[in-house]
Image: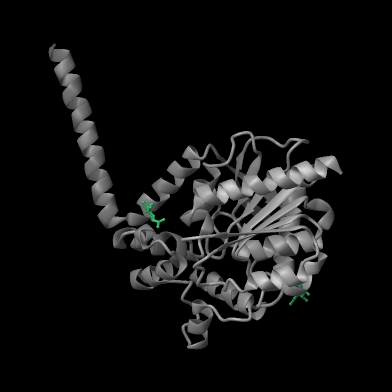
Amino acid sequence: MEVISTIVQLVGGAVLTTLALAVSLYYTKPAYIIYFFQRLNTWRAGCTIKYVKVGEQQFAYLERGRRSKNQPSLLLIHGFGDIKESFCEMIMHLPKNLHLISIDLPGHGDTSIKAKANLSIEAIAANLHQFVGVIGLDRGPLHVLGHSMGSGLAGCYAALYPGEVSLLTMTGPTGIKPAVKSLVFEKIDQGNKYLLVPETVEQAEEMFNICLYNKSLIPPKQLLKGYVDYYMRPHVSFFKELFDAILEQEDVLTPLLGKITAPTQVIWGRHEQVLHISCVDVIKKEMTAPLQVDIIEDCGHTVPLETPQKAASLILNFRDKFAKKQNKS
Ligand SMILES: *[C@@H]1O[C@H](CO)[C@@H](O)[C@H](O)[C@H]1NC(C)=O
Ligand SMILES: *[C@@H]1O[C@H](CO)[C@@H](O)[C@H](O)[C@H]1NC(C)=O
């Protein structure tokens, strides 16, 4: 009995120590908590972290499942200032047998970028094309999906390499100049240019407030601090440079839309405040490929994080519909 009570005491002591450590980390080094949740989400999503060299450049990505001739692999491209793990919530709602890869874009997460790299969307798409070739994703059917800047890149990729893309999903793509200015672009005009590159907790709060429709998803202040320390601060100068490049290429995707041949799904949050929903009219006008438009109610800019389950079910619905059509023809 004594042995048991000693063990119980030891285990109890270990649990208390862990808890105390977690609480103290939360207050002293919230970036570690962010890092921990990121790893936990990767694990919950069943993904493995991988690295590959493309010439001198290192690419980091998450992978789940294996390439199959019968169903397109899914390549996930995150948004500006984001990382590969931002798709984990959505991946949890996708079937386990679907082969998928989520990359860190050049200069984001653990993917490197050359100093003074060309930040045009075409040049980044060409860089992604090298990555796709190195890991062999071009050897089977491929479904490219992007969010925000990643979505603009996905559209550009599908226009530049039409033979390689069998399906395309764009959630709120950049690179289309809408008829109506969004809140973010109004603020940029008023001189608040880098509001998507927050350097303080207050600025991060403002950014999440703009990007999310459901305000209860805005992280508590202490985690916002971790977010700023971990995601933003190490990359601030690159993010600003990249944001300038995005602004310069405000309408880069519009003339490319007509070159896309893959069946395309466009997803937009009804309450999007970064990229105005009137971009959908431009897409409908310019695109000639088969098009499915899905608007998600009660959702803002950050579709994969805000409504992961809904987004996953819309993506599966689109894949079902067009995979069947492609099999018939
Ligand atoms: C960047 O890349 C684009 C597209 O490949 C090209 O048109 C442009 O000239 C390049 N810019 C520089 C400065 O090399
Ligand atoms: C907002 O998010 C919370 C937390 O995930 C959720 O419980 C709630 O249902 C969401 N509200 C709406 C309107 O979607």
* Residue at screen point 44% across, 70% down: 210
Q: Residue furthest left?
A: 2
Furthest-top residue in this view: 1
The answer to whether residue 211 is left or right of residue 55 is: left
Q: Residue furthest right?
A: 329
Pick whichever, 25 or 71, lies toward us: 71
Measuring from the top left, give residue 22's x and y in whole percent. 27, 45
Numbered marks: total: 0
- Left or right: residue 16 versus residue 76 is left
What is the basis of the colouring in this image?
A: one colour
Q: Residue at x 13, y 11 (%)?
A: 1
Q: Which quadrant does the C terminus fall into?
A: top right
Let me know if residue 175 appears in the view.
no
Position of residue 152 measured from the top left corner of the image (x, y, whole percent): 66, 66
Q: Is residue 321 something one can see in this rendering? A: yes
Q: Residue at x 81, y 59 (%)?
A: 261
Give the left or right position of residue 56, taking residue 69 as reference.
Answer: left
Say whether residue 307 is left or right of residue 117: left
Please tell me whether residue 134 is drawn above or below residue 176 in the rendered image.
above
Where is residue 98 shown, x and y percent of the image? 65, 38
Q: Camera-side residue: 3 or 222?
A: 222
Q: Say if 26 sits above or below 273 in the image.
A: above
Depicted 6 relative to depicted 173: above or below: above
Q: Which quadrant of the picture is home to ligand 2?
A: bottom left
Picture coordinates of residue 276, whole percent (x, y): 57, 74
